[in-house]
Image (cartoon, rainbow, N blue to C red):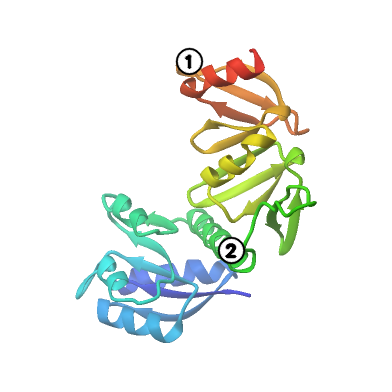
Amino acid sequence: MPLKTLIVEDEPPARRRLARLLEDTGRVEIVAEADTVRDAVARIRHHDPHVVFLDIRIPGGDGFDVLERLETLPLVVFVTAYDDFAVRAFERDAVDYLVKPITAERLVEALDRVERRLEKEQVQAGIPEVLSRRPGMPARIVARRRGRIVLLAPEEVSHITADHTLVFAWKQGHSYLVPRTLQSLEEELTEQGFRRTHRSVLVNLAAIASVRPAESGNFLLELSDGQGTRVPLSRRRARALREEIGF
């Protein structure tokens, strides 16, 4: 199913170029365009798009004013000529932040992020528990891959990574979307032998094959996942891990 997409951009040449780049991907259906805050709010309410590509400087206010006036927010990719609004954009849970001029490659990356976020939200809506601890049932991490719900045994998972708001469990080099925060998974999986090695990485201690020094007193952990995957071990977390595995 194509992504229902709405473009908010007040400059006609820029709006046409963005529409062309989006259509060239073959992954979107542009349901409407708008060039002011008022029009943007009305058309987002009417069309209920999956994603809005939202300029920041538009007549009647700015892109943040559009979000303030909406009761239900779509996914948002900010598109702007300015790079100094990025922090504020991500505070409003933006999926991505594109600085003009936009390349086709960067646009595809943004669409990938949108699709991953939508998939995560669908999983969250349909799966109330990620780690099953019902009496008599083994622990399982409930994840999603290519439209399928997958139950992963923790011992099969080499590591878990966070990419912005998305969390992925890795098994034999393949990633599985998990609808939980890294912190909540850390709390659940500590007893299963997982440890935080970096702010964005949880590692299964049983999957560590080797430890290599890196820059600034940090380390790299090479995993026995058949892919030679390397994940970071920060200097701050290295001391506690050294005591556990004795490197």
The residue carrying mark 2 is 124
Q: Nearer the viewer, residue 49 or 187?
A: 187
- Sequence-wise, the earlier of marks 1 and 2 is 2
Q: Amino acid at mark 2?
A: Gln
- Quadrant assignment for the N terminus: bottom right
- Quadrant assignment for the C terminus: top right
Q: Amino acid at mark 1?
A: Gly
Placement of 118 over or under 159, stated as above or below: below
Q: Given the current orientation, which residue lies at the most extreme front position?
A: 135
Q: Dot 2 surroundings within 10 Å: few (below 14), some, or many (20 or more)?
A: some
Residue at 65% x, 13% y is 246
For residue 36, say whether it is visible: no
Q: Dot 1 surroundings within 10 Å: few (below 14), some, or many (20 or more)?
A: few
Tag 1, which secondary structure? Answer: helix
Q: Quadrant of residue 123?
A: bottom right
Placement of 186 over or under 85, stated as above or below: above
Position of 246 compared to 68: left or right? right
The residue carrying mark 1 is 217
Q: Quadrant of residue 144?
A: bottom right
Residue at 73% x, 47% y is 139
Position of 156 compared to 94: left or right? right
Placement of 171 over or under 135, stated as above or below: above
Residue 151 in picture, x, y percent from top left: 75, 54
Position of 213 compared to 158: left or right? left
Position of 113 compared to 98: left or right? right
